[in-house]
Image (tube, rainbow, N blue to C red):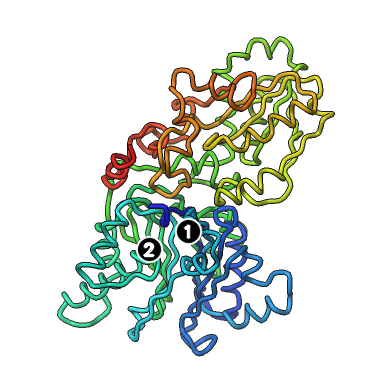
Amino acid sequence: MGDVKEECGVFGVYLKNTKDKTLVPRLIYSGLSQLQHRGQLSAGFAVLDPNCGIYRKRLSVLKKTGLVDELFEANHNSKSEKLFHDYRGIAGIGHVRYCTSGGADNEQFIINGTQPFERRHGRLWKRFAFGYNGNLTNYTDLKKRLKTQEGYHLDTTTDTEVIMHLISINLKIIADNSGKNIKPSHFDVHRKLMEQLDGAYNLIELFADGDMVTIRDPLGFKPLVWGESQDFYAIASESVALEKIGINKFFPVSPGSCMVFNKQGVKSEQLIKSSILSRCHFECDYFSKEGSFFDNQSIHLTRRKLGENLVDIDPLKSEVIKNPKDYVVIPVPKTAIPAAEAFAEKLGVRYSSAILKSGSKRGFINPKNTRKKIMDNVYSVLSEEVRGKKIFVFEDSAVRGETIQRVIGPLRNAGAVEIHFRSTEPPIRYPCFYGIDFPTKGELIASQYNPEDFEKKFAEKIGADSAVFQTLEGLVNATGFDRGGLCLACLTGEYPTPGGRRLARLVR
């Protein structure tokens, strides 16, 4: 499974009129820039021009390793303007990616897995490009079936390629079953696809005949939103990408549904209705941008509530209230800021950004050797803010425990007299098979200790005076969703899909 675990971002746009077709790549650039935090390894986009675009292709794809700015030549105005002109169209999709496999440092490996993937075919309704966010728990079974039953050769080790072939096969089978080789309904094709897939997935597809299609898995693991302006429709992994391009009224894509955008407008159909939902709680706590909404719930307010809920269970609460001037609350990563602020406000103590982070890369989503290089050089401390103080240091989670171990020493050296670690996330004890990068138990620090004395042992390991983690109840309460509407598998070991439960048995 090491080659197929990824967390990415997808974006799509479809013009209502075609007055300025360079608007499509410009909007893709703006949208993907807002999703850069979801993938920093590579980026790509595809555009549709029915009048034949660059190299006389109806579908044109451009992909690169690196960041969105590098893909669009953002630092070279003349080059970026030429790109916008060359890749003009009436619709387009974009993708940012990171992967966790051992080949993540190999450029050719990265390029092979960079999206959008393109499926070529002489019939326009069978030719498409698509981007994908998620992870399939039945990837191995599907890959084996394609090889043995269909005789397929796969060029990559990603579940993205498997999905591409399944879409193609379903197009053919449903068309053949009709008795005529005519274009089948996207709803029929994707209903069949949903029946084949197990796991988390958001797809955006661009067909050469003029359709843009998006689906969200029936359990709704990952956020996906859509909206429209006077001039275009747009879809994105996060609402901040839509707001960036002027869409302030947006809607979640319903779990288990398919939406089709074309010159006639937009059509939507519920393909599969699930009795439960499994929204990834880690999107709320860490992955999504603070300004985003996840199925209409504010990420910012969720993170503030996480901080407030920690106050209620903090064993130092009474002491802090008596001597508030002795304490300072400091967040480590940016995602912990709203929780730290709310915690400080509720206790009446000072909040400070005394730990400085250089650069913008997220250590969590990079390969192990890259994470170490980033975190070894990324943190510094303002000694005047911590000298002689008792510090509450806030983190959004402690997946591997790497980040916090690199800030405790500098805080001590800067003169902090006590350091108390607080996590807005409960201890993560189990692997995630739905797209978050902590796949093996060996990487999870919480799995190395008994639950009964974990906080004490964790504090000793990192060199803190105490450690308190969010409760499961406090987490659920903060999200605004019912417990039955969240995926909590990495916290409880209870996996919501058959494929996830099977993989869990294999790693125990």
Q: Residues within 10 Å of mark 1 (few under 14, many from 20)?
A: many
Image spot of residue 370 (x, y percent): 61, 51
Q: Is residue 431 left or right of residue 16?
A: left
Which amino acid type is shown beneath numbered disc 2?
Met
Q: Label 1's element?
A: strand
Which residue is at 64% across, 29% downward? 342
Q: Quadrant of residue 148?
A: bottom left
Q: Which mark is residue 460?
A: none
The residue where tag 1 is placed is: 226
Mark 1 vs 2: CB contact within 8 A: yes
The residue where tag 2 is placed is: 259
User: Vertical placement of 432 versus 153: above or below?
Assistant: above
- Is residue 121 visible to the viewer in this orientation of the structure? yes
In which quadrant will I find the C terminus? top left
Distance of mark 1 from mark 2, alpha carbons?
Answer: 10 Å
Which amino acid type is shown beneath numbered disc 1?
Trp
- Is residue 264 visible to the viewer in this orientation of the structure? no
In the image, 202 versus 226, the foreground residue is 202
